[in-house]
Image (cartoon, grey):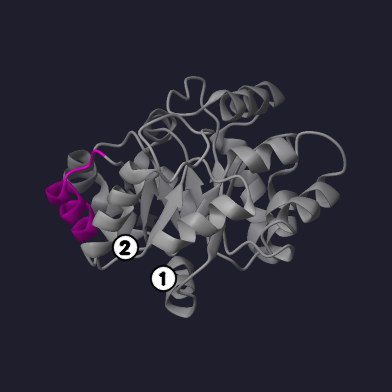
Amino acid sequence: MNRIDLLFKEKKNNILSIYYTAGYPGLGDTVAIAEALQESGADMLEIGFPYSDPVADGPVIQATSKQALDNGMDLNLLFEQLKQLRKKVTIPVLLMGYVNPVLQYGVENFCKACADAGIDGCIVPDLPMYEYEELYQGVFLKYGLRNIFLVTPQTSDERIRKIDGLSDGFIYLLSASATTGKNLNVSDVTTTYFSRVAAMELKNPTLIGFGISSKETFEKACKYANGGIIGTAFVKAVAKGDLKENISSFMKMFR
């Protein structure tokens, strides 16, 4: 069974997924961060592969992407590093990034490299749903990868149903139609949105991302979904100092 499916089968609530950028803060930190996060209680990891034009990301993650590229990170090196991943890391791991590097690498080559490295799924926010369905779904399925779609407060019920039908693993609920790094503000608008999605009784579990930076905001997300995704707050926390110590200290806020 895919590790993502197994996680949601065994754990229904308070799932904590952590995003970080491969090759940041140091070029060789990718697998070490994964190991430290697992040791500190993360349920799932999303490893971002950097891109030169990360339009959906806020300034913090944009800066990590630039630093990682300056450090020399690319998909070839990332997959080379990930050969060491499954020696110690047993929790689900996804790759997250923009479609352009995937197309340049070759979609089948990318999916095969993911499978060879023990990657369980991918989040490619700018991959159009119809292109995935018509051109790439078969390739993802061939290599056992879950493709995770994003939903925003503006996504119609019809489209959410379509996404649910095309999905396995989970659905990523953006807390707002904005770039990453904004604070989660559960206003009347977002409460209505989260409640609307919950009432649809989708076949896939959901995780809320964008703006989760504290135990309080994580717990808010868990009221409306199976868990939450933390990115910006985490990469801020590991920017300087001892990597393992910083990760342990950060995770103690949630675990």
Q: CA distance from mark 1 to mark 2?
A: 8 Å
Q: Which residue is mark 1?
A: 5
Quadrant into which the N terminus falls: bottom left
Give me the residue at 82% from left, 34% from top: 240
> Is residue 254 visible to us here?
yes
User: Callout 2: few (<14), some (14-19), or many (20+) C-alpha neighbours within 10 Å?
Assistant: many
Between discs 1 and 2, the one toward the N terminus:
1
Instruction: Answer left or right for 214 relative to 109.
Output: right
Q: Which residue is drawn at the image coordinates 53% and 37% (left, top)?
A: 183
Magenta run includes residue 161: yes
Q: Quadrant of residue 29?
A: top right
In which image quadrant can residue 100 be found?
Answer: top left
Tell me which residue sits at (60%, 44%) in the image.
213
Residue that appears at 75% across and 57% down: 36
Q: Secondary structure at mark 2?
A: loop
* Residue 251 picture location, percent across and down: 71, 56
Q: Secondary structure at mark 1?
A: helix
- What range is drawn magenta here? 154-167
Query: What residue would you read off at disc 2?
Result: 168
Is residue 105 covered in magenta? no
